[in-house]
């Protein structure tokens, strides 16, 4: 064995190093620590495939492009912030960190945020919920109710500090100041707004006596109006026993609440005008209805007069109608008698023909041709063969005309 000594310490320059063995778990932890210490949060662009959500609520999927793929997971806590539901084939941007799932040694992307590429998350969430509720019948026209005419009690679900509420109250007071208004103040945007709106709709239903309800707010961005696109609000409107008018934003704004409500108003002000029309407009409608009614009555009277006139003309000479009927009766009587006589003649002919055929079949007709019938006495039995008689028997012979009684003198 060759040893190289250190001049100072007289020690081996190269000593044998003991080998160290790593377990699989230690290796995976080493790789995980190395990745996490050298790779910060990244944004990854790709397409979702194999998306699944087990009962735990965590989202598992594969993020891929045309050349590679990586497993990804978004835990339930981070998934609660999603505005839309990821779907297979959707192009997205994912923010997260890359690490190793040490139990299986899998390289994974732990996702904190997901943004759709192209269309925004809110737009996709809007379309997904719209499609879902449409399939469940929440938008069906046949279930929508007509608004009550001149409601006595009006419920309003909106913010108590907005211009929308002031405008609605002003319209109601100007047109019908005696109407009862119940305002249920709620948050109309931000966290918890949808829950407050849904709870307010339920509260007004439980209160009773509310004839119609306005649910809405003034204009804003899609994010500002988002509470009215929440499924919770849509189902509260659908379950309401009170007819609901949705009045969210401006005329160009459409929300899920608009599709579910019994009626949609382009603005909150328009909603108040819709449920309480101006008195002048009602008077104009009444005048128009009166005019239409008058025209209808005049038309009915004119038509009735024409009908009566036609009947009068037809009944101008009742005696003529009577004479015509009498002549018609005579014609029918003559025709009936003729038909009866013809039927009687035909019956007589058929009877004569039947009698002739019956006579031709009668034994008497045979006698007319020179034959006779012999009856043995006293039995009155017709004699068919000579051997049936013996000398001394008495027989009666029936001729075509008359009969004779004889005695047999000879048997041949």
Image (cartoon, rainbow, N blue to C red):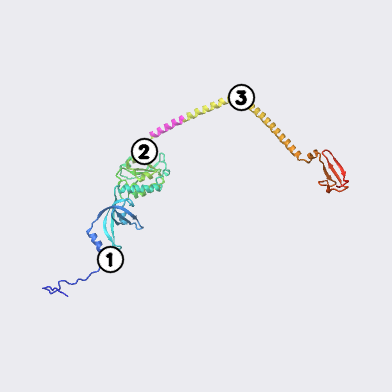
Q: Position of residue 261 (x, y in %)?
A: 38, 44
Q: Is residue 285 above or below residue 132?
A: above
Camera-side mark, 1 or 3? 1
Question: Can residue 270 be seen here?
Answer: yes
Q: Residue at x 72, y 34 (%)?
A: 349
CA gap, disc 2 and disc 3: 68 Å
Determine which residue is flagged by label 1.
24
> In the drawing, does residue 98 fall left or right of residue 302?
left
Residue at 67% x, 28% y is 334
The mark lying in front, picked from 2 and 3, is 3
On the image, the x and y values in percent for residue 21 come to 25, 69
Magenta: main secondary structure equals helix
**Figure quadrant of the N terminus:** bottom left
Mark 1 to mark 2: distance in Å?
Answer: 74 Å
Report which quarter residue 67 is drawn in: bottom left
Q: Quadrant of residue 275?
A: top left
Which range of residues does the magenta coloring cover? Answer: 280-295
Residue at the limit of the structure toward the left, as seen here: 8
Q: Height in image: 337 above or below 7?
A: above
Q: Position of residue 30 (x, y in %)?
A: 24, 63
Residue located at (84% from left, 42% from top): 397
Of the pair 172 and 123, the residue shown nearer to us: 123
Dot placed on the residue nearer the N-terminal end, 1 or 2: 1
Q: Is residue 395 above or below residue 12?
A: above
Indicate whether 185 appears above or below 175: below
Please give the residue where the numbered disc 3 appears in the rendered image: 320
Image-based side of 359 in relation to 131, left or right: right
Question: Toward the viewer: 142 or 175?
Answer: 142
- The residue that disc 2 covers is 273
Q: Position of residue 87 (x, y in %)?
A: 33, 52
Confirm whether the magenta stretch covers residue 309: no
């Amino acid at each position: 064995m060759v040893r190289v000594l250190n001049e100072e310490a007289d020690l081996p320059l190269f000593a044998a190093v003991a080998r160290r063995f790593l377990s699989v778990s230690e290796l995976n932890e080493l790789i995980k620590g190395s990745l996490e210490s050298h790779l910060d949060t990244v944004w990854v662009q790709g397409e979702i495939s194999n998306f699944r959500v087990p009962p735990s609520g965590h989202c598992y999927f594969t993020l891929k492009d045309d050349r590679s793929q990586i497993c990804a997971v978004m835990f339930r806590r981070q998934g609660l912030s999603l505005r839309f539901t990821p779907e297979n084939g959707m192009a997205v941007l994912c923010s997260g960190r890359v690490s190793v799932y040490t139990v299986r040694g899998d390289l994974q992307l732990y996702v904190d945020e997901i943004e759709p590429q192209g269309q925004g998350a809110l737009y996709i969430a809007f379309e997904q919920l719209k499609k879902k509720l449409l399939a469940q019948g929440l938008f069906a026209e046949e279930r929508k109710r007509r608004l009550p005419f001149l409601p006595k009690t009006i419920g309003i679900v909106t913010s108590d500090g907005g211009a929308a509420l002031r405008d609605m109250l002003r319209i109601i007071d100007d047109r019908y100041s005696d109407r009862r208004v119940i305002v249920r103040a709620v948050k109309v945007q931000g966290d918890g707004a949808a829950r407050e709106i849904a709870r307010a709709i339920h509260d007004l239903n439980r209160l009773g006596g509310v004839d119609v309800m306005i649910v809405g707010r003034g204009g804003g961005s899609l994010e500002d109006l988002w509470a009215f696109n929440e499924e919770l609000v849509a189902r509260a409107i659908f379950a309401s026993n009170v007819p609901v008018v949705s009045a969210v934003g401006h005329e160009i704004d459409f929300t899920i609440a608009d599709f579910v409500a019994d009626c949609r108003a382009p603005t909150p002000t328009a909603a108040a005008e819709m449920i309480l029309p101006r008195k002048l407009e009602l008077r104009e409608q009444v005048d128009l209805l009166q005019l239409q009614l008058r025209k209808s009555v005049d038309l009915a009277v004119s038509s009735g007069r024409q009908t009566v006139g036609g009947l009068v003309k037809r009944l101008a000479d009742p005696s003529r109608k009577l004479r015509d009927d009498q002549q018609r009766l005579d014609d029918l009587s003559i025709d009936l008698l003729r038909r009866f006589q013809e039927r009687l003649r035909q019956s007589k002919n058929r009877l004569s023909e039947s009698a002739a055929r019956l006579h031709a079949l009668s034994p008497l007709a045979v006698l007319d041709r020179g034959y006779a019938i012999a009856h043995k006495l006293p039995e009155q039995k017709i004699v068919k063969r000579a051997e049936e008689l013996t000398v001394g028997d008495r027989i009666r012979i029936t001729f075509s005309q008359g009969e004779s009684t004889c005695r047999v003198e000879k048997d041949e």
